[in-house]
Protein backbone atom coordinates (compact mmCIF):
# COMPACT_ATOMS: atom_id res chain seq x y z
CA UNK A 1 0.00 0.00 0.00
CA UNK A 2 1.46 3.39 -0.95
CA UNK A 3 2.38 5.78 1.83
CA UNK A 4 1.38 9.05 0.23
CA UNK A 5 0.02 12.15 1.90
CA UNK A 6 -3.20 11.86 -0.12
CA UNK A 7 -3.71 8.35 1.29
CA UNK A 8 -3.53 9.72 4.83
CA UNK A 9 -6.08 12.37 3.95
CA UNK A 10 -8.39 9.71 2.51
CA UNK A 11 -8.12 7.66 5.70
CA UNK A 12 -8.92 10.75 7.77
CA UNK A 13 -11.88 11.50 5.48
CA UNK A 14 -13.12 7.95 6.02
CA UNK A 15 -12.91 8.51 9.77
CA UNK A 16 -14.94 11.72 9.44
CA UNK A 17 -17.48 10.05 7.16
CA UNK A 18 -18.01 7.14 9.55
CA UNK A 19 -18.48 9.48 12.50
CA UNK A 20 -20.84 11.75 10.57
CA UNK A 21 -23.00 8.68 10.01
CA UNK A 22 -22.75 7.82 13.71
CA UNK A 23 -24.18 11.24 14.50
CA UNK A 24 -26.88 10.94 11.83
CA UNK A 25 -27.93 7.50 13.07
CA UNK A 26 -27.97 8.55 16.73
CA UNK A 27 -30.10 11.60 15.97
CA UNK A 28 -32.47 10.28 13.29
CA UNK A 29 -32.50 6.50 13.72
CA UNK A 30 -30.82 5.66 10.43
CA UNK A 31 -27.73 6.51 8.45
CA UNK A 32 -27.45 7.58 4.83
CA UNK A 33 -26.96 4.29 3.00
CA UNK A 34 -24.16 5.00 0.51
CA UNK A 35 -21.79 6.91 2.84
CA UNK A 36 -22.37 4.33 5.58
CA UNK A 37 -21.92 1.33 3.31
CA UNK A 38 -18.62 2.67 1.95
CA UNK A 39 -17.04 2.83 5.40
CA UNK A 40 -18.64 -0.27 6.93
CA UNK A 41 -17.58 -2.47 3.99
CA UNK A 42 -13.99 -1.32 4.56
CA UNK A 43 -13.67 -3.46 7.69
CA UNK A 44 -13.66 -6.54 5.46
CA UNK A 45 -11.03 -5.19 2.99
CA UNK A 46 -7.79 -5.83 4.84
CA UNK A 47 -5.45 -6.60 1.92
CA UNK A 48 -6.46 -3.89 -0.57
CA UNK A 49 -3.74 -2.36 -2.75
CA UNK A 50 -4.53 1.25 -1.87
CA UNK A 51 -6.62 3.32 0.53
CA UNK A 52 -8.96 4.18 -2.35
CA UNK A 53 -9.49 0.44 -2.93
CA UNK A 54 -10.29 -0.09 0.76
CA UNK A 55 -13.28 2.22 0.31
CA UNK A 56 -14.30 1.30 -3.23
CA UNK A 57 -12.78 4.40 -4.85
CA UNK A 58 -12.26 8.06 -4.00
CA UNK A 59 -15.81 9.06 -5.11
CA UNK A 60 -17.26 7.00 -2.25
CA UNK A 61 -15.40 9.18 0.25
CA UNK A 62 -16.64 12.49 -1.13
CA UNK A 63 -18.92 13.13 1.89
CA UNK A 64 -16.00 12.64 4.25
CA UNK A 65 -13.64 14.76 2.18
CA UNK A 66 -16.14 17.62 2.05
CA UNK A 67 -16.78 17.35 5.79
CA UNK A 68 -13.04 17.37 6.48
CA UNK A 69 -12.68 20.48 4.33
CA UNK A 70 -15.49 22.19 6.23
CA UNK A 71 -13.97 21.28 9.59
CA UNK A 72 -10.53 22.57 8.60
CA UNK A 73 -11.92 25.83 7.20
CA UNK A 74 -14.31 26.21 10.15
CA UNK A 75 -17.32 26.12 7.84
CA UNK A 76 -18.76 23.34 10.03
CA UNK A 77 -20.38 25.01 13.05
CA UNK A 78 -21.12 21.70 14.79
CA UNK A 79 -17.91 20.33 16.32
CA UNK A 80 -19.51 17.00 17.29
CA UNK A 81 -17.72 14.99 14.59
CA UNK A 82 -14.35 16.56 15.42
CA UNK A 83 -14.79 15.71 19.11
CA UNK A 84 -15.77 12.14 18.29
CA UNK A 85 -12.75 11.87 15.99
CA UNK A 86 -10.37 12.83 18.78
CA UNK A 87 -12.00 10.21 21.02
CA UNK A 88 -11.63 7.53 18.34
CA UNK A 89 -7.98 8.45 17.73
CA UNK A 90 -7.28 8.03 21.46
CA UNK A 91 -9.15 4.72 21.47
CA UNK A 92 -7.17 3.54 18.45
CA UNK A 93 -3.89 4.00 20.33
CA UNK A 94 -5.17 1.74 23.09
CA UNK A 95 -6.60 -0.79 20.62
CA UNK A 96 -3.34 -1.00 18.67
CA UNK A 97 -1.49 -1.80 21.90
CA UNK A 98 -3.73 -4.78 22.70
CA UNK A 99 -2.75 -7.80 20.50
CA UNK A 100 -5.43 -10.04 22.03
CA UNK A 101 -8.17 -7.56 21.16
CA UNK A 102 -6.77 -7.14 17.65
CA UNK A 103 -6.85 -10.93 17.18
CA UNK A 104 -10.41 -11.14 18.51
CA UNK A 105 -11.59 -8.44 16.09
CA UNK A 106 -9.78 -10.10 13.18
CA UNK A 107 -11.29 -13.50 13.97
CA UNK A 108 -14.74 -11.96 14.29
CA UNK A 109 -14.49 -10.17 10.96
CA UNK A 110 -13.42 -13.38 9.23
CA UNK A 111 -16.47 -15.08 10.70
CA UNK A 112 -18.85 -12.31 9.56
CA UNK A 113 -17.29 -11.73 6.12
CA UNK A 114 -19.11 -14.52 4.22
CA UNK A 115 -22.52 -13.14 5.21
CA UNK A 116 -21.39 -9.61 4.26
CA UNK A 117 -20.34 -10.91 0.85
CA UNK A 118 -23.69 -12.63 0.36
CA UNK A 119 -26.07 -10.04 1.82
CA UNK A 120 -24.11 -6.77 1.82
CA UNK A 121 -22.19 -4.97 4.55
CA UNK A 122 -25.25 -3.02 5.71
CA UNK A 123 -27.68 -5.95 5.93
CA UNK A 124 -29.34 -5.85 9.39
CA UNK A 125 -27.88 -9.22 10.35
CA UNK A 126 -24.38 -8.09 9.37
CA UNK A 127 -24.76 -4.82 11.27
CA UNK A 128 -25.98 -6.76 14.30
CA UNK A 129 -22.95 -9.09 14.14
CA UNK A 130 -20.54 -6.18 13.70
CA UNK A 131 -22.19 -4.34 16.57
CA UNK A 132 -21.82 -7.36 18.84
CA UNK A 133 -18.17 -7.73 17.83
CA UNK A 134 -17.48 -4.09 18.69
CA UNK A 135 -19.32 -4.40 22.02
CA UNK A 136 -17.37 -7.53 23.00
CA UNK A 137 -13.94 -6.20 22.02
CA UNK A 138 -13.11 -2.54 21.34
CA UNK A 139 -15.94 -1.19 23.49
CA UNK A 140 -14.33 -2.83 26.52
CA UNK A 141 -11.25 -0.59 26.16
CA UNK A 142 -10.87 2.83 27.72
CA UNK A 143 -11.43 5.62 26.96
CA UNK A 144 -14.84 4.65 25.58
CA UNK A 145 -16.37 6.69 22.79
CA UNK A 146 -19.54 8.33 24.08
CA UNK A 147 -22.24 8.98 21.46
CA UNK A 148 -24.97 11.55 22.08
CA UNK A 149 -28.32 11.35 20.30
CA UNK A 150 -32.07 11.02 20.62
CA UNK A 151 -32.96 8.68 23.52
CA UNK A 152 -35.85 7.26 21.49
CA UNK A 153 -33.44 5.93 18.85
CA UNK A 154 -30.57 5.06 21.20
CA UNK A 155 -32.95 2.67 22.94
CA UNK A 156 -33.47 0.62 19.76
CA UNK A 157 -31.25 -2.43 19.35
CA UNK A 158 -30.84 -2.09 15.57
CA UNK A 159 -29.86 1.57 15.86
CA UNK A 160 -27.28 0.73 18.52
CA UNK A 161 -25.94 -2.08 16.33
CA UNK A 162 -25.51 0.27 13.38
CA UNK A 163 -23.77 2.89 15.53
CA UNK A 164 -21.37 0.26 16.84
CA UNK A 165 -20.69 -1.03 13.32
CA UNK A 166 -19.91 2.54 12.23
CA UNK A 167 -17.61 3.00 15.23
CA UNK A 168 -15.79 -0.18 14.22
CA UNK A 169 -15.36 1.34 10.76
CA UNK A 170 -14.10 4.56 12.37
CA UNK A 171 -11.47 2.66 14.33
CA UNK A 172 -10.48 0.87 11.11
CA UNK A 173 -9.93 4.26 9.46
CA UNK A 174 -7.96 5.52 12.45
CA UNK A 175 -5.70 2.45 12.38
CA UNK A 176 -5.16 2.95 8.66
CA UNK A 177 -4.35 6.64 9.14
CA UNK A 178 -1.81 5.84 11.84
CA UNK A 179 -0.24 3.03 9.78
CA UNK A 180 0.27 5.50 6.93
CA UNK A 181 2.15 7.90 9.20
CA UNK A 182 -0.67 10.09 10.49
CA UNK A 183 0.00 11.96 13.73
CA UNK A 184 -1.62 14.45 16.06
CA UNK A 185 1.16 16.88 15.18
CA UNK A 186 0.18 16.73 11.52
CA UNK A 187 -3.41 17.57 12.47
CA UNK A 188 -2.16 20.71 14.18
CA UNK A 189 0.30 22.04 11.60
CA UNK A 190 -0.61 20.30 8.36
CA UNK A 191 -4.11 21.59 7.68
CA UNK A 192 -3.08 23.81 4.77
CA UNK A 193 -1.45 20.89 2.99
CA UNK A 194 -4.45 18.69 3.76
CA UNK A 195 -6.78 21.26 2.25
CA UNK A 196 -4.66 21.27 -0.92
CA UNK A 197 -4.95 17.47 -1.05
CA UNK A 198 -8.72 17.62 -0.56
CA UNK A 199 -9.01 20.21 -3.33
CA UNK A 200 -7.34 17.75 -5.71
CA UNK A 201 -9.83 15.02 -4.85
CA UNK A 202 -13.13 16.93 -4.50
CA UNK A 203 -14.62 18.00 -7.86
Image: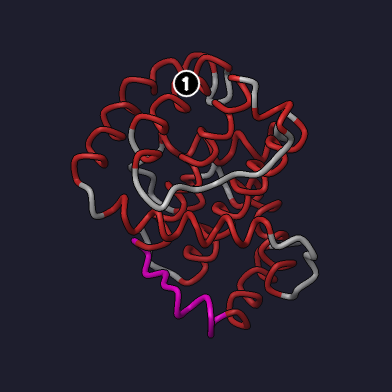
Return the x and y of residue 105 as percentages of the image width and height: 31, 34
Horizontal side of residue 129 vs 156, given as left or right = left
Horizontal side of residue 192 vs 180, given as left or right = right
Return the x and y of residue 4 as percentages of the image width and height: 43, 69
Residue 163 drawn in magenta: no
Q: Compare residues 148 and 133 and report the one nearer the observer.
A: 148
Return the x and y of residue 51 as percentages of the image width and height: 46, 53
Q: From the image, which quarter does the C terminus lie in?
A: bottom right
Q: Label 1 crowding class (10 Å Cα cut-off): few <14, some 14-19, many 20+?
A: some
Count how many numbered circles sit on residues in the image. 1
Q: Pointer 1: what residue?
A: 116
Q: Is residue 127 above or below residue 118?
A: below
Horizontal side of residue 45 vs 96, given as left or right = right
- At 74% from the left and 75% from the top, the residue drawn is 73
Q: Is residue 197 above or below residue 79?
A: below
Q: Is residue 90 above or below residue 134?
A: below
- At 41% from the left and 31% from the top, the residue drawn is 135
Residue span colored magenta: 179-190
Q: Compare residues 98 and 119 and report the one nearer the observer.
A: 98
- At 54% from the left and 65% from the top, the residue drawn is 9
Q: Compare residues 181 and 75 and report the one nearer the observer.
A: 75
Residue placed furthest toward the front? 151
- At 53% from the left and 23% from the top, the residue drawn is 127
Q: From the image, which quarter does the N terminus lie in?
A: bottom left
- Provide the secondary structure element on which disc 1 rests: helix
Which quadrant of the structure image shows residue 107? top left
Q: Compare residues 153 and 10 and report the one nearer the observer.
A: 153
User: What is the basis of the colouring in this image?
Assistant: secondary structure
Amino acid sequence: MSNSFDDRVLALAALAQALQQVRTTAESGQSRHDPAEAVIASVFRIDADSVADVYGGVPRLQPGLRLLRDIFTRQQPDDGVAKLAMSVLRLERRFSAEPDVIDAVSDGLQRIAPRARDDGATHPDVLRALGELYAETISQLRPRVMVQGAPHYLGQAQVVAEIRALLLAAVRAAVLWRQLGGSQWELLIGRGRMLESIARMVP
